[in-house]
Image: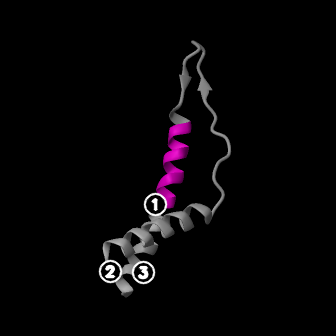
Amino acid sequence: MTDKEIETLVSKKLNDAYHSEEHPKKFFLTENGRGVVDGGDMYNALLEDMMRIMQKATTDILKEALQK
């Protein structure tokens, strides 16, 4: 595979993986009694979502690349 083919494959598979499932529309921030906002829940939800996308895309990329 050429560099351009790999680049196209990666781009296509990432896009396919992103659109293959529904993503969170809202991320909630919690506030403790002192008025401090905790973005940890939002960060963890976003990280989990992105890791699912990357895992699916990477798996598909490797499957297709190894077939050639």
Whichever of labels 3 and 1 marks the residue nearer the N terminus, that label is 1
Select label 2 or label 3 by which is in front. 2
Dot 3 surroundings within 10 Å: few (below 14), some, or many (20 or more)? few
Residue wearing tag 1: 54
State whether residue 56 appears in this view. Answer: no
Residue wearing tag 2: 1
Foreground residue among 9 and 49: 9
Q: Position of residue 63 (x, y in %)?
A: 41, 79
Determine the residue positioned at 38% across, 87% down: 67
SS type, badge 2 = loop
Determine the residue positioned at 63% across, 53% down: 23
State whether residue 14 appears in this view. Answer: yes
**Residue 64, which numbered label?**
3
Q: Position of residue 49 (x, y in %)?
A: 54, 52
Q: Quadrant of the N terminus?
A: bottom left
Determine the residue positioned at 43% across, 70% down: 8
Give the magenta part as a residue range. 42-53
Foreground residue among 33 and 56: 56
Name above or below for residue 11 compared with residue 23: below
Residue 61 part of the magenta segment: no
Q: Amino acid at mark 2?
A: Met
User: Are circles 2 and 1 on residues that touch, CB within 8 Å?
Assistant: no
Dominant secondary structure (helix, strand or loop) of the stretch shown in magenta: helix
Whichever of labels 2 and 1 marks the residue nearer the N terminus, that label is 2
Q: Position of residue 7 (x, y in %)?
A: 39, 68
Name above or below for residue 24 compared with residue 34: below
Q: Quadrant of the C terminus?
A: bottom left
Whichever of labels 2 and 3 marks the residue nearer the N terminus, that label is 2
Q: Amino acid at mark 3?
A: Glu
**Residue 63, which numbered label?**
none
Foreground residue among 15 and 28: 15
Foreground residue among 53 and 35: 53
